[in-house]
Image (cartoon, grey):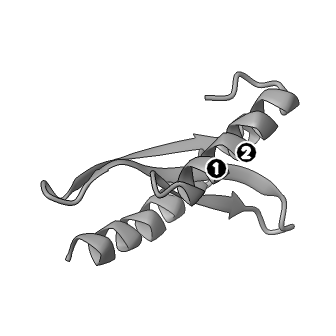
């Protein structure tokens, strides 16, 4: 995960995009009300046979406690439920 440096965050997002293109995790970028990227939520370790996965989120510190995490989890869980049904 990014450690707070802009370049590290950019590299992390690029890595996630490349992994998704390869069919690994499913990720969604989260935007604030000004259309700025503030977070990313990922379905990873997807196991279709076991119908299981893990969910991870990276949110910029300034956005903690403002409801973005909960909203992103609801949205990504909807994707998970659709893919496992």
Q: Secondary structure at mark 1?
A: helix
State the residue in front, 60 or 84. Answer: 84
Looking at the picture, how far across and down is residue 2, in whole percent? Answer: 68, 28
Q: Measuring from the top left, give residue 49's x and y in whole percent.
A: 14, 58
Residue 59 sits above or below residue 4 on the image: below
Q: Quadrant of residue 76?
A: bottom left
Spatial CA span between label 2 and label 1? 6 Å
Q: Residue 8, image x and y in percent? A: 78, 28
Q: Quadrant of the rendered structure where residue 14 is? A: top right
Crowdedness near tag 2: few (<14), some (14–19) or many (≥20) residues, C-alpha within 10 Å? few
Q: In the image, residue 56 lies at what x, y percent?
A: 46, 43
Q: Residue at x 21, y 60 (%)?
A: 48
- Residue at 44%, 59% in the rendered image: 73
Relative height, residue 32 to residue 14 (above, below): below
Q: Which residue is mark 2?
A: 14
Kindly identify which residue carries mark 1. 18
* Front one among 2 and 19: 19
Tag 2 secondary structure: helix
The dot on residue 53 is: none
Which residue occupies the extreme left position in the image?
Answer: 50
Q: Tell me if residue 39 comes above or below residue 61 in the rendering.
A: below
Q: Residue at x 61, y 29 (%)?
A: 1
- Whether pointer 2 and pointer 1 mark residues with C-beta atoms closer than 8 Å, the reply is yes
**Mark 1 neighbour class, 10 Å CA radius: few under 14, some 14 to 19, many 20 or more:** few
Query: Can you see residue 67?
Result: no
Decide which of 83, 61 is in the foreground and name it: 83
Residue depicted at x 36% and y 65%: 77
Quadrant position of the C terminus in the picture: bottom left
Residue 28 appears in the picture as rendered: yes
Q: Which mark is in front, 2 or 1?
A: 1
Asked if residue 38 lies left or right of residue 69, the reply is right
Total marks drawn?
Answer: 2
């Amino acid at each position: 995960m990014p450690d707070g440096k802009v370049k590290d965050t950019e590299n992390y997002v690029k890595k996630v995009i490349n992994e998704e293109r390869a069919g690994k995790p499913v990720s969604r970028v989260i935007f604030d009300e000004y259309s700025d990227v503030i977070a990313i939520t990922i379905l990873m370790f997807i196991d279709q046979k076991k119908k299981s996965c893990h969910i991870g989120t990276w949110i910029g510190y300034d956005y903690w406690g403002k409801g973005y995490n909960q909203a992103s989890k609801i949205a990504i869980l909807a994707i998970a439920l659709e893919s496992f049904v």
